Amino acid sequence: DTAVSQTPKYLVTQMGNDKSIKCEQNLGHDTMYWYKQDSKKFLKIMFSYNNKELIINETVPNRFSPKSPDKAHLNLHINSLELGDSAVYFCASSRGQSHSPLHFGNGTRLTVT
Amino acid sequence: GNSVTQMEGPVTLSEEAFLTINCTYTATGYPSLFWYVQYPGEGLQLLLKATKADDKGSNKGFEATYRKETTSFHLEKGSVQVSDSAVYFCALQTGANNLFFGTGTRLTVIP
């Protein structure tokens, strides 16, 4: 029943490793997003995809690569993890219209040691 | 450019107190305005929205009015409860994929 689901909920890993976070939405939305939330709760958009095509790619290290196999999925791959990547990552989706709100997943807390 | 300036927290109130969280914005065009709420350990949820000037969004006792003349969208609630403790985000959206969040305001309501 979960509208936007992301896995895993927690991810603890060491510096230099490569990891992935998966996201799926069952709302039939055309647009999906990845946001990063830091320890001060500040939200920053990372990527936005519309119908599997990249729309927004903010200033994010190229170690971060989104992959959208279909419009219901947007996965986030992170290579060569660094300490500063520790944060909560949120997936979201929307209808992609100017007044359409975002529906968020519950977040993945990534801790890099 | 587009930006949202939100009242800095944290805000601590006693139960049944009146709540105001200020939000002002700068935008090109005619944005839609939103308040999202984030409860501990969860993702953001839409609380309310307004899509044009003078619209009032309301939900769960919270209200906010889209004021174009003051470029504001302040969040209010007449009587807060402990269960309202959360982080509140003001946001504006100017196009299909242009969503801008404020920095969030943490509210703690004590019994």
Image (cartoon, coloured by chain):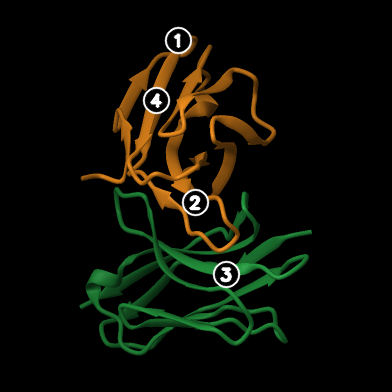
The chain letter for the residue carrying disc 3 is B
Task: From the image, tell me which residue sits under label 4.
Answer: A21
Give the side of residue B80 with respect to residue B72, left or right: left
Hey, what amino acid is under mark 1? Asn
Crowd around label 2: few <14 · some 14–19 · many ≥20 (10 Å): some
Of residue A75 and residue B39, the one placed in the foreground of this image is: A75
Residue B29 appears at what percent x and percent y?
A: 76, 67
| Disc 2 to disc 1, C-alpha distance | 34 Å
* Residues at circles 2 and 1 in contact by the CB criterion of under 8 Å: no
Horizontal relation, residue A77 to residue A108: left or right:
right
| Numbered disc 3: secondary structure | strand
Seen in the image, is A19 located left or right of residue B50? left
Q: Disc 3 marks which residue?
A: B33
Q: Which residue is mark 1?
A: A17
At horizontal 37% and vertical 74% (from top left) the residue drawn is: B12
Q: Amino acid at mark 3?
A: Leu
* Residue type, label 2: Arg
